[in-house]
Amino acid sequence: MKGSSTLLLVALTLLCSCGLATGEDSGEFFMEFLQTLLVGSPEELYEGPLGKYNVNADAKAALTELKSCIDDLQPMHKAELVKLLVQVLGSEDDA
């Protein structure tokens, strides 16, 4: 569990620094990243939300391990995370 928490912290740090460094809407970047992390592949992360960034080998290894942790969630729990993401995306559309 400690390793998973560390990976999550690394991922969130990467998200915040990438979003802030580019002036990109960090909420939009985060939602695209999270959506890809939940239902995509690691390669889709690098081609999609992280496509314009130079992601080093250590960060790629951390993201691959984080993706593996998410993929190993019980299907019920992963489905609930996807539902939450859809709910958040829906509320952004209403704003």
Image (spheres, rainbow, N blue to C red):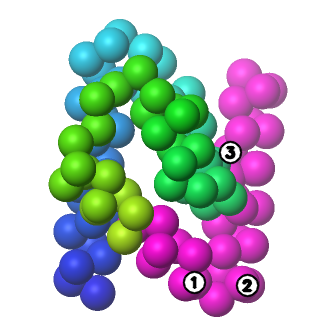
Mark 3: amino acid:
Val
Q: Residue at x 79, y 39 (%)?
A: 90
Q: What residue is drawn where x is 29% and y is 21%?
A: 20
| Mark 2 and mark 3 residues within 8 Å of each other at the beta carbon | no
Judging from the image, what secondary structure is the residue with disc 2 in? Answer: helix
Q: Secondary structure at mark 3?
A: helix
Instruction: Work out whether mark 2 precedes mark 3 in sequence or the reverse, and give the earlier one.
Output: 2
Distance from label 1 to label 2 (Cα)? 8 Å
Residue type indicated by callout 2: Met
Q: Is residue 49 magenta?
A: no
Quarter of the image that includes the N terminus: bottom left
Distance from Cα at disc 3 to Cα at disc 1: 21 Å
Q: Which residue is mark 1?
A: 73
Q: Residue at x 28, y 29 (%)?
A: 54
Asked if residue 91 is among those painted magenta in the image, a careful observer would answer yes
Is 25 placed left or right of 83 in the picture?
Answer: left
User: Which mark lies nearer to you, 1 or 2?
Assistant: 1
Q: Which residues are magenta?
A: 66-95
Q: Which residue is mark 3?
A: 88
Q: Is residue 76 above or below residue 60?
A: below
Name the residue tied to disc 2: 76
Residue 65: x and y in percent read: 37, 70
Evaluate whether residue 56 shows in this view.
yes
Front-lying residue, 48 or 80: 48
Q: Residue shown at 45%/77% (left/top)?
A: 69
Q: Residue furthest top?
A: 23
